[in-house]
Image (cartoon, rainbow, N blue to C red):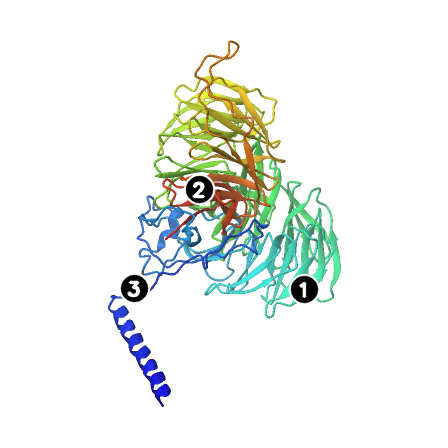
Amino acid sequence: MIGLFNGRSAVRILLVLLTLTMLLAACGLVQPRPARFGGEARLLTATPTRRSTVEARPQATRTAAPLAPTSTSSSAMLLAHSDPAASGLQFPLQMGFELPQDLPAITVDNLLQAVEIATWGRGVVEDLAFAARGSLLAVATSTGVYLYEHPGLKVRDVFSGSSPLTSLALSPDGTLLAAGDRAGKVHLWRVEDGELLRTFNGHEWIRDVAFSSDGRYLGAGSDDGDLRIWQVSDGLVWRVFTGARHTSTIAFSPDGRTFAAGAGSEIWIWDIAGEEQVAVLRGHQGRVTVIAYSPDGETLASGSLDRTVKLWNPSDGVLLETLSSGSYVAVHEIAFSPTGDRLAVGLEGRRGDVVQGTVQLWDLDDGSLELTLEAVSGAIGGLAFTPDGRWLASSNTHQVRLWDAANGLAAETLDGFVGPLYSVEVSPDGAYLATGSAAGSVRLWRSQDGVVLVTQHDSSAVQPQRPALPVAFSPDGSLLASAVRSGGVRLWQVPGGPQTLIINGSDRATALAFSPDGSLLAIASADGELALWNTSSGAHVQTLCDGGGCPAAALKFSPDGAWLAAGLQNGLVQIYRTADGSLARTLTAHRGVVRGLSFSPDGTLLATGAEDGVVRVWSEPARAPTPTPAPTEPATGEAPAPPEDWGAVRRPVLDTASAMAFSPDGRLLCIGTQSGVVQVWDLRTNEMLRQLSGHSAAVNAVAFSRGGSLIISAAEDGALRLWGVP
């Protein structure tokens, strides 16, 4: 009885204590223990960073006050939330919302609590589509799908993808959205609430997706040559057609009886019910890039790299007409108007190295060219008419435009799609970020809220596959240097001031670096030249390496300005004396292009990373006093040579190390990798402490904010991600 009595008393006491605790919490007198966003503390070993194995992004619930955008254009449409708290805003914050100002410096002790504080940039535009019914415009990018209400083009919803998206399609009734990605998957969302219903597997890189006219089936074409058709209702494979080789485009006929696909320079057509090939259309001299059925199904249009659009009778395979694009080099997109009497053609043109895109509108009743729309930078990658045919949407990698289909005038532009990012720099005062993209644009971002203050377009830019524009801030933050694709470097006043001068180098700049005192700008050129230039006058000061050598992919001055390190494309790292321009040391560092290069804040360490999946941290023993010069040596005052016993600690990242940065205290080393993960290493213990996941493509640049409260990463998915401890 005594034991029973004691047990019941204990239960009563616990209930009383629990009740008191709840009452005190309700009154605000007791605060719950804050959650640790990183889960249990643990050390991560260096393992291959496949996206399926990295950490999931923790979500925080802290809100922040919005900052009004500096522009009322559609580029700030993500600022629709006037009250983040009321809208239930969570990290990561979008462009236009002010970052918390009291974030602590990221250290070994709190790294596991770091979360993605903000995401700026909507990625690289890959495809777009209007819902056949209603007023919805869907835009697929490398970071997800953005849904816009039309008219007004306000963001309605965002669906995130785990791999860069490549194509999309809306079901005929507009209730479902399918998107293919580079990982060979097709994702199916419900438009109403954004729920991911299922993911279809079994392919390589998805090139195109399409719904049947009744919405019951979903087809996909990919690099593996197989064409799969799934039943939407249960996700089961319904048909598989093989042998089509590289398939970049597919289409269902409006009556749902046939299925067509581009196969090299041919178009293959299958009878779906009978599962047999019924026609092969031949006539193009280049790869077929796009096909589309007319609304009545009586015409099949095809575009090709041979610069032509061909109109076919799909029932008998007879070629009806050929439309020539003229001097343009390729046809990438076509779209029939809802009435079927007009055809929009998206083109790619060249002026030397300059890539431009435009849209032609053809009258199919008489085969005449009606309109040619204003040219834009970059090839046209997406086309879609509104359901009523009044408007036409087009896209390149970094922009979506809405055109009046009657007169061809531009009506509205959607910005915020920045293209693949290859460089990021933080201004010395921490007020700005600068990025360079493969689309040939340099942007100046306000670091407080991610609003883009200035965009400078390089008129000579734009093959996305070519190296992008490097950028660099002067040490006092007053100047921003940016490369010009055709050669040379521009110096701009910050923020958004006029161009102060242009330095005409020998070739296109591949890397830039200001000396610590700001008097010199080191420029590496594509022809292998490495030279120092005066930033006040633009005068040439010294050539460290003549053209004809191996180009440098990365440049860094030591903190004291005595040394300039150059990471070369052949895997070597060269160390130059800035006093006389002599080569002090060549480090046999890597195999493959050295893209990552960073001195520690005290200058005692040099980190190098390359395509061989290895990061080396070179340690320099304590500097000895400048030796007394021998009679044959230069006069005193030159920097001592890097010691022959510079050591290297090898860190097997097991992934291409494309960028790196030391924390302000020199304890942590951030490494950007080609798999889209940012690794954070403890240099004291030689252990990888954390992998920051979120990017869907290669991370090309990383940086710490002033004070070290943020880790900033820029990637080929066209996004800037900011990580911090809330």
Classify 10 Å Cα crowding around label 3: few (below 14), some (14-19), many (20 and above). Answer: few
Q: Amino acid at mark 3?
A: Gln
Q: Is residue 234 above or below residue 246?
A: below
Classify 10 Å Cα crowding around label 2: few (below 14), some (14-19), many (20 and above). Answer: some
Callout 2: helix, strand or loop? loop
**Which residue corresponds to the image point at 62% horizontal and 31% vertical from the top-left?**
570
Structural distance between the alpha carbons of marks 3 and 1: 64 Å
Camera-nearest residue between 328 and 19: 19
The residue labelled by disc 3 is 31
The residue labelled by disc 2 is 667
Q: Amino acid at mark 2?
A: Arg
Camera-nearest residue between 308 and 13: 13
Task: Please state the horizontal and vertical placement of residue 441, each as a whole percent of the image.
Answer: 47, 37
- Closer to the observer: label 2 or label 3? 2
Q: Residue furthest bottom?
A: 1
| Quadrant of res 476 | top left
**Which residue corresponds to the image point at 45% horizontal and 65% vertical from the top-left?**
193
Q: Is residue 513 left or right of residue 220?
A: left
Classify 10 Å Cα crowding around label 1: few (below 14), some (14-19), many (20 and above). Answer: some
Q: Is residue 296 above or below residue 360?
A: below
Q: Is residue 420 visible?
A: no
Marked residue nearer the N-terminal end (3 or 1): 3
The residue labelled by disc 1 is 257
Structural distance between the alpha carbons of marks 2 and 3: 33 Å
